[in-house]
Image (cartoon, helix red, strand yellow):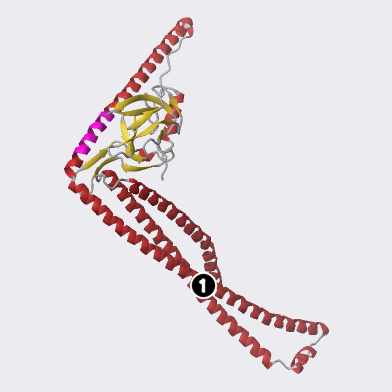
Amino acid sequence: MRKLLLLLIGILFALTPAFAQSRDELERKKKEIQQEIDELQKVQRSLSKDKKTSLSQLTLVQNKLKKRQSVIENINSQVQLIDNDIFMNNREIYRLKNQIDTLKEQYGRTIEYAYKNSSNYDMLNFIFSSTSFNDAIKRIQYLKSYRNYRDEQVANINKARASLQGKVATLAANKKEKSNVLVEQSKQLKMLEDEKKEKSVVVTKLQQREKELGKELAAKKRVERNLQNAIAAAVKREIEAARKKAEAERKKAEEDAKKLADANAPKASKPSTATPAKPGARKSSVLENSPEVTRVSLGFENNRRALPWPVDKSMIVSGFGRKKIEGTTLYEDNIGITLETTPGSNVKAIYDGIVSSVFDIAGEPAIIIKHGKYFTTYQNLASVTVSKGQEVKTGQVIGKAGTNEDGDGQILFVVTIESKFVDPELWLKPR
């Protein structure tokens, strides 16, 4: 039983640092989310009150709601960890109280025995009744050990009392901490309710201008379709150029092989055949027509969730894919992600590559950069600082962010694998 108790105590002590670390991590994460909420609120305050309600405003409020819910979940986890500490401290207090009672009882019996046998005559009689000198020495040592044992009992009782007082103080601190966290939880829940009401107001305003919003989405769709065609055309040109290069290299290799065969006719051997690809092997692209280009492709491919954002300070106001606009019968499609930022902010290449195309869509500049078989597109720029065929590096400024119809800074960022559109967030660092 004692071994089991010691084992449980050991486990509790082993778990304590892990809990402390988890609580520190939760507190750090909560501060990060709160900073993100503060940034969203700054963007919201920067919007003019006389502006018409837009999808960007709805996305902003929805993002605030999601982050607020994340804060509340974070606080719930903190409460759970505190409850775990309270439970363990209560259990330790109960154990220490039982230990003290046991030690007191043992000490009481010791004192009672010592009292009954405390006369000097009994002690001397105990010593002088020894059968030999060595026996007398042993009896004196026994009496000393017995006295030390009583002193040790007192020390153990005092030590257990000190531990108990420490645990009681820790428990009080846990309860106070929990009380403070619950106050913060109540505050966050109130903010969540206010933001839900705020979202309802935005949704209602969008419903009132649904027809106008439908026209805006149709115009956006036309621009997006033109952009899709431009991307497809640029990728097609790159593929055709790669095929022509590959064909030219193949013909040259055949000519060189024929010349070599003619020069060494008696020793000519049959041309070797290409080794078929192994099942499950990575599928290559015609665009990967050199080791250098293939390395760029693999670099981009292997940097999922690790590449920098095209604009440093920005937020997603329209995510990838098709989604229903809350409160309306309308749907919004996006071949990339729409980022809202400060007008004129630097737009940067997210990875090494070569500028494949620079063109205009609806009067606004756009850039396509080739990263092997991957392509990134940056649309709705105010200006461009690169040209077609130019080599660019990760983080290099390629232009400035343009504005949307409301005057807010905004760009569209697109990622494709050849002509296949994929979610750009899969490659960007999580924020």
Q: Residue furthest left?
A: 211
Q: Is residue 224 magenta?
A: yes
Q: Is residue 385 above or below residue 422?
A: above
Span highlighted in magenta in the image: 215-228
The image quarter in which residue 421 lies:
top left
> Could you say which is closer to the camera, residue 1 or residue 352?
352
- Left or right: residue 173 versus residue 160 is left
The image quarter in which residue 373 lies:
top left
Q: Residue at x 61, y 79 (%)?
A: 157
Q: Position of residue 310 (x, y in %)?
A: 40, 36
Q: Amino acid at mark 1?
A: Glu
Q: Residue at x 32, y 58 (%)?
A: 192
Q: Residue at x 62, y 78 (%)?
A: 158
Q: Is residue 222 magenta?
A: yes
Residue pointed to by mark 1: 92
Residue at disc 1, secondary structure: helix
Q: Is residue 149 above or below residue 260?
A: below
Asked if residue 5 can be seen in this view, the reply is yes
The image quarter in which residue 339 lies:
top left
> Could you say which is closer to the camera, residue 152 or residue 401?
401
- Left or right: residue 166 versus residue 273 is right
Asked if residue 374 can be seen in this view, the reply is no
The C terminus lies in quadrant: top left
Q: Position of residue 330 (x, y in %)?
A: 19, 43
Numbered circles on residues, count: 1
Q: Is residue 419 above or below residue 198?
A: above
Q: Residue at x 73, y 82 (%)?
A: 142
> Could you say which is closer to the camera, residue 323 or residue 153?
323
Q: Residue furthest right?
A: 133
Secondary structure mainly formed by the magenta segment: helix
Q: Position of residue 194 (x, y in %)?
A: 30, 58
Q: Residues within 10 Å of mark 1 (few under 14, many from 20)?
A: some
